[in-house]
Image (cartoon, grey):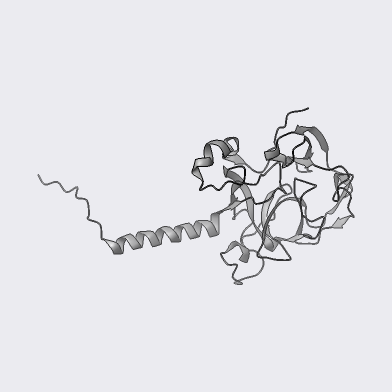
Amino acid sequence: MSDKSVVKKSGGLGETISVVVQALLLALVIRTVLIQPFNIPSGSMRPTLLEGDYLFVSKFSYGFSKYSLPLSPNLFSGRIWGSEPLRGDVAVFRTPADTSIDYIKRVIGLPGDKVQVREGVVYINGVAIPRVKVGQINNPDVTEVTHPVDVYRETLPNGVTYDTLDLTQNGLGDNTREFTVPAGQFFMMGDNRDNSADSRFDLGTVPLENFIGRANIIFFSIADKASPLEIWRWPTEMRFDRLLRSVNGTSFTPKSQ
């Protein structure tokens, strides 16, 4: 009886090139349509996100605009299959003044909202969102300073809770005018309230078209400005407790002091 379980011989260089091209096209489709990796280069979202965090951003959460595509070709305007960001989402977007720059902030105000900060408390449509001191963090890797920092937990009207840092009492952004969010735009704030260039300042409100996606999962995190390629630093600098951590809807739990 002959054995017909024969392994087909590889087609050589041509077949290898074909497989590589297909893999690259698949990766491009995934990056364009589904998810895109981003890294955090600054401390404006501390303690939720730290410098050295690497994220997967869901690009299909808000639909697609030209900024969803590599090089942002001007193929269409607005969004297709679009849905609006939810209050409390941590989102990546292009800044209105320079659409070559990516920012990541939290959605605080929706179209039509009136937003104001008074003595560090955020007011939405005249109503203060609950803000409770939950303790302090005394960890320079989290706070970027060498002294204990007060942590306040905020709860938005839709129930989303998150922690914010208060580095300085009566800081520059702790008292603002009242902002009215235009139709089709969103008011964005960083969780590190005294160290965030956001909608309270020159950033202004962000059009829906500028949104790239919703930050979902931290898949890698390394401290002390180490590169992920510096494998020899992983044992001492890797933040193992942050790996595969959800970005939205979770809070850091500091120790009360």
Relative to 251, does residue 190 appear above or below in the rendering?
below
Is 159 on the left-hand or right-hand side of 10? right
Q: Residue at x 81, y 34 (%)?
A: 133
- Quarter placement of the N terminus: top left
Q: Residue at x 70, y 32 (%)?
A: 253
Percent position of residue 225, x then y: 61, 47
Question: How many numbered marks, from 0 up?
Answer: 0
Relative to 248, does residue 203 appear above or below in the rendering?
below
List the single residue furthest toward the left: 1
Percent position of residue 56, x then y: 58, 49
- Quarter placement of the C terminus: top right
Is 81 on the left-hand or right-hand side of 27? right
Relative to 202, does residue 91 appear above or below in the rendering?
above
Percent position of residue 10, x then y: 25, 57
Is 14 on the left-hand or right-hand side of 141? left
* Residue 18 picture quarter: bottom left
